[in-house]
Amino acid sequence: MKKIPESIQLAWEKRMGASIFTTVDNQNVPNSIYVKSIVRFDDSKFLIADNYFDKTRANIKQGSKGVILFMVSEAEAYQIKGNIKYHTEGEFYNDMKKWNNPKHPGHAVVVLEVEEVYCGSKTL
């Protein structure tokens, strides 16, 4: 697990719109979805609410890694890559239930543990 650089933490607070979350299936076919129910949990983890996952949930359960992509401006994008774990109870799940919009089901929460961080193609 890698600590999220302070510059990325600041950029996260300025992100525009929804983030993109990508997983891959066991044939290495990628699946990308827009996510709005996502938070930075601490300096090494992001939480994503599973409100309507289907392919994403299946990919996670098959052991996929994950990628979060977000934009700060039209010319500034960031990628965060890492291991992901799926939780239907416990600390992370309970935290998600506090911030996830109650109109959404919040079936579970995905925890992405940061391993790699990029600004465009530059490794940070």
Image (cartoon, helix red, strand yellow):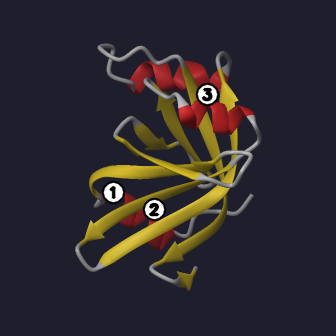
The reply to whether callout 3 and callout 2 are in contact (CB within 8 Å) is no
Check disc 3 and give the amino acid type: Phe
Residue found 67% across the figure and 45% down from its top = 25
In the rendered image, which quarter contains the N terminus? Answer: bottom right
Residue 74 percent across, percent down from the top left: 23, 74
Residue found 57% across the figure and 47% down from its top = 42
Residue count near mark 3 (Cα–Cα under 10 Å), binned few <14, some 14–19, many ≥20: many
User: Up-down: is 109 above or below 121?
Assistant: above
Residue 27 is left or right of residue 22, and the answer is right
Residue 13, labelled with which disc? 1
Nearest to the observer: residue 123 or residue 31: 31
Q: Which residue is mark 3?
A: 92
Residue 16 percent across, percent down from the top left: 25, 58
- Label 3 to label 2: alpha-carbon separation: 19 Å
Q: Element under label 2? A: helix
Residue found 67% across the figure and 25% down from its top = 87
Instruction: Compare marks 3 and 2 and give the one earlier in the sequence.
Output: 2
- Label 3 to label 1: alpha-carbon separation: 20 Å
Check disc 2 and give the amino acid type: Gln
User: Up-down: is 23 above or below 48?
Assistant: below
User: Up-down: is 52 above or below 65?
Assistant: above
The reply to whether callout 1 and callout 2 are in contact (CB within 8 Å) is yes
Residue 9, labelled with which disc? 2
Residue 50 percent across, percent down from the top left: 50, 27
Residue found 61% across the figure and 28% down from its top = 92
Residue 81 is left or right of residue 97, and the answer is right
User: Up-down: is 33 above or below 68?
Assistant: above
Nearest to the observer: residue 89 or residue 27: 27
- Label 1 to label 2: alpha-carbon separation: 7 Å
Residue count near mark 2 (Cα–Cα under 10 Å), binned few <14, some 14–19, many ≥20: few
